[in-house]
Image (cartoon, rainbow, N blue to C red):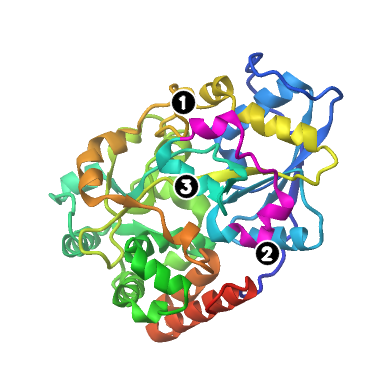
Amino acid sequence: MKKQKVILAIVLVAILMASVVSFSAAETTTKEPVTLTIMANQDWVTKPYMKKAWENYEQATGNTLEFIVVPIDSGEQFMMTKFATGNIPDIFMHFGGYGLVPYNPEKNFVDFSDEEWVNDIQPYVKDQAIINGKVYGLPFWEASISGMLYNKEIFSELDIAVPTTQTEFETACETIKNADITPIYLAFKDVWPLLYQFAVDTMVVNTDTLDKLNSNEITYADIPEFTAMVEWYKKMADNGYLGDKFTTNTWDGCPQAMGEGEYAMIYIWDAWVSSDLEPKYPGISDKFGLCPAFLGTPEQGTYEGPNVCLTFANKNSKNVDAVIDFVNFMANPENINIAFEDYATAPVFKSQTSSIPTPQYTESKESIDKVGTASIAWPSIIGFTQVEAAKYIQDVMIGNKTVEQCIEAMDKDRIESARAQQVPGF
């Protein structure tokens, strides 16, 4: 993995919440108040359901949660350095799959496989919580569907039908651009919002392809669709579909870009509308629809299914009993339903009855069922990286690399990562 500059984490001590939520159903075993540290990236700590659940825990136990908040785009190196030096927080948040390997889950995290709440996890989420046959993390998260969010008013005014193919999508981009509206907002500066895994998911849905990648029998360069995807990113930039100053676009700028109608579309997940856009632009939710994400391949586009972040407990913590108690508290059905009350998302847990489906999902369900969903690349491809690999795609978009050089660099990093993990065949 390419080295990143380590950025110091921002430590938020004893976050103060404005609202008061009473919670008494979940009993805790902690006797004396303690302070527990949670390491997470700066986007995750702003999730309203996380904040509500954490506040419930503090009020019920008298314990304090101290947050080590890392940058979205460069925090991975910081976190891995902390683990490598043994400076591990009490509680750790991260996605599952092979990306968790550098954190040595067997050595560092509590095995919750036998807890009752494991059976409460929805089937379409459970695989993401299983690492090496064990459940180390609690998937306390939203079950969002990702695709292309589009402004229905702009589409209507320009008489654009919701695209169902890559060809139709490119035609829509041209029509929007000719109307002096920027077709797509891409938070280029933050790197990860390129979300190239949406397309890669479809390339490895065939398990034979995935198996061959993970045994080093083939590379990205051997997959024609991979080249088509990188070429599409270049085409978006060259054709003006991202605007003239797309390289300065940031993730924090997404709500304004979409809320003010400056852009017509964005690659995103449905729950983002309620979590990030609606709070800044009340009543705007109905203005947006969801269609497949078109990234050069496949022709019919794709949706990505739930990709959940997990909460892990440091089994070597001096406060390990309190840490285990924290995770079990979070998993309590009453806490779950208080945290997700009226929040627009599909449920992660079977007992989760207080959340509601997003309007975007409801309106697009027929398309979602037809196209299908996948969330395979990130958790299942050995050596897959969201940020580092996307930087090579960015190099293509701004003319610093050819498509071939980009894919070669992505393969090189992936293979080196697999070798570092001592994966057979590499």
**Side (left or right) of 179 relative to 195:** left
Q: Which residue is mark 3?
A: 127
Q: What x and y, as percent, mark residue 182?
A: 31, 59
Residue 187 seen by the camera: no
Q: Decide: is 169 above or below 333.
A: below
Does 401 lie within the magenta span? Answer: no
Residue type, mark 2 in image: Gln
**Side (left or right) of 127 relative to 298:** right
Q: Quadrant of residue 3?
A: bottom right
Residue type, mark 3 in image: Asp
Badge 3 crowding class, 10 Å Cα cut-off, few under 14, some 14 to 19, many 20 or more, is some
Q: What x and y, as percent, mark residue 407?
A: 43, 80
Badge 2 crowding class, 10 Å Cα cut-off, few under 14, some 14 to 19, many 20 or more, is some
The part of the chain drawn in magenta is 100-121
Q: Residue at x 51, y 63 (%)?
A: 386
Q: Decide: is 301 above or below 218.
A: above
Q: CA distance from mark 3 to mark 2?
A: 26 Å
> Which disc is residue 220 wearing?
none
Instruction: Mark 2 or mark 1: name the one nearer the start of the chain.
Output: 2
Q: Decide: is 331 above or below 187.
A: above
Instruction: Mark 3 or mark 2: name the one nearer the start of the chain.
Output: 2
Q: In the picture, which quadrant includes the N terminus?
A: bottom right
Q: Are marks 1 and 3 in contact (CB under 8 Å)?
A: no
Q: Nearer the viewer, residue 8 or 312?
A: 312
Q: Which residue is mark 1?
A: 352
Q: Are marks 2 and 1 in contact (CB under 8 Å)?
A: no
Q: Which residue is mark 2?
A: 77
Mark 3, secondary structure of its residue = helix
Q: Decide: is 340 above or below 178.
A: above
Residue 5 seen by the camera: yes
Residue type, mark 1 in image: Gln
Q: Residue at x 30, y 56 (%)?
A: 293
